[in-house]
């Protein structure tokens, strides 16, 4: 079946540090890949997506590249801000349904 | 343009009771999916409705049922509540045809606590 594995948190960084959150997946066929972000007390917001191999999704300084050979979709940001503190979910989509990882909490201190 | 709206935002029930959660999709969307997010976990797919019928279903028991109305809004019903049903229930909508961007839009969820 389909599954997503992402690094456990929390990830604790100082402002302006470099961020990487690892995500790998197992899927049949060719899924689309997503990163969603959840701020405290809120629902999920789409951060970025990639629909085929070697695509790079980007938004608000975050980037992730769809790597079919390593079945990975790692999230990166060059310089994090306090406002980036949230829980980040990696997900894959097959047949219009999403399979999520367990989420990684990011805490950014000033 | 209103996004996905859910009600109620919070509710408390006791074991054995039944609950109904409601969702209005984003304008122009005709497909509604429901997800259960337990504390500290990622959302898990419950089922999806399109054209008033259940189109796909995840690994959830028959106690979980749903409905979609002609205006595309949807309800999630859970019978015989268990303590383990305590979770954030998320509704997501998506479109078909020209409204199909491949993206699911989520509401803020209904937090259910079962005592």
Image (cartoon, grey):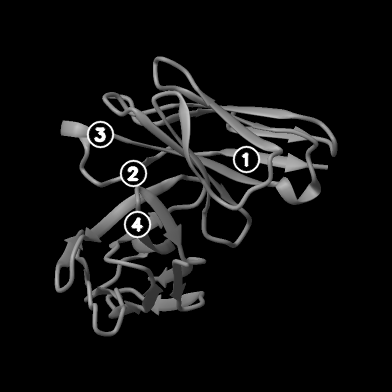
Front position in the image: A32 or B86: A32
Could you say whether the residue bearing mark 1 is in a helix, strand or loop?
strand
Q: Which residue is mark 1?
A: B111
Q: Position of residue A99 (x, y in %)?
A: 44, 59
Q: CA distance from mark 3 to mark 1?
A: 29 Å
Q: Chain of mark 3?
A: B
Could you say whether the residue bearing mark 2 is in a helix, strand or loop?
loop
Question: Is A15 on the left-hand or right-hand side of B35?
Answer: left
The C terminus of chain A: image quadrant? bottom left
Could you say whether the residue bearing mark 3 is in a helix, strand or loop?
loop
Quarter of the image for residue A76 reads bottom left
Q: Which residue is mark 2?
A: B104
Instruction: Return the disc, 3 or 1, that comes first in the chain's sequence.
Output: 3
Depth check, mark 2 against mark 1: the one in front is: 2
Depth check, mark 1 against mark 4: the one in front is: 4
Q: Which mark is residue B96?
A: 3
Q: CA distance from mark 2 to mark 3?
A: 11 Å
């Amino acid at each position: 079946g389909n599954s997503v594995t992402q690094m456990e948190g929390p990830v604790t960084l100082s402002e302006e540090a470099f961020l990487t959150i690892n995500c790998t997946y197992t899927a049949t066929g060719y899924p689309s890949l997503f990163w969603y972000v959840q701020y405290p007390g809120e629902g999920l917001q789409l951060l970025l997506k990639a629909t085929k191999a070697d695509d790079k999704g980007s938004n608000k300084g975050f980037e992730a590249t769809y790597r079919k050979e390593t079945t990975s979709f790692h999230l990166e940001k060059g310089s994090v801000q306090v406002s980036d503190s949230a829980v980040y979910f990696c997900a894959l989509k097959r047949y219009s349904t999403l399979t999520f990882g367990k989420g990684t909490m990011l805490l950014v201190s000033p | 343009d209103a996004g996905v709206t859910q009600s109620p935002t919070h509710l408390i029930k006791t074991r054995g009771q039944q609950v109904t959660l409601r969702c209005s999709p984003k304008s122009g969307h005709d497909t509604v999916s429901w997800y259960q997010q337990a504390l500290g976990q990622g959302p898990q797919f419950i089922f999806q409705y399109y054209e008033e019928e259940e189109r796909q279903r995840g690994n959830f028991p028959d106690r979980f049922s749903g409905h979609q109305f002609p205006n595309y809004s949807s309800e999630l019903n859970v019978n015989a509540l268990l303590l383990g049903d305590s979770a954030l229930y998320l509704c997501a909508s998506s479109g078909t045809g020209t409204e199909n961007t491949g993206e699911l839009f989520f509401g803020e969820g209904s937090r259910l606590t079962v005592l």
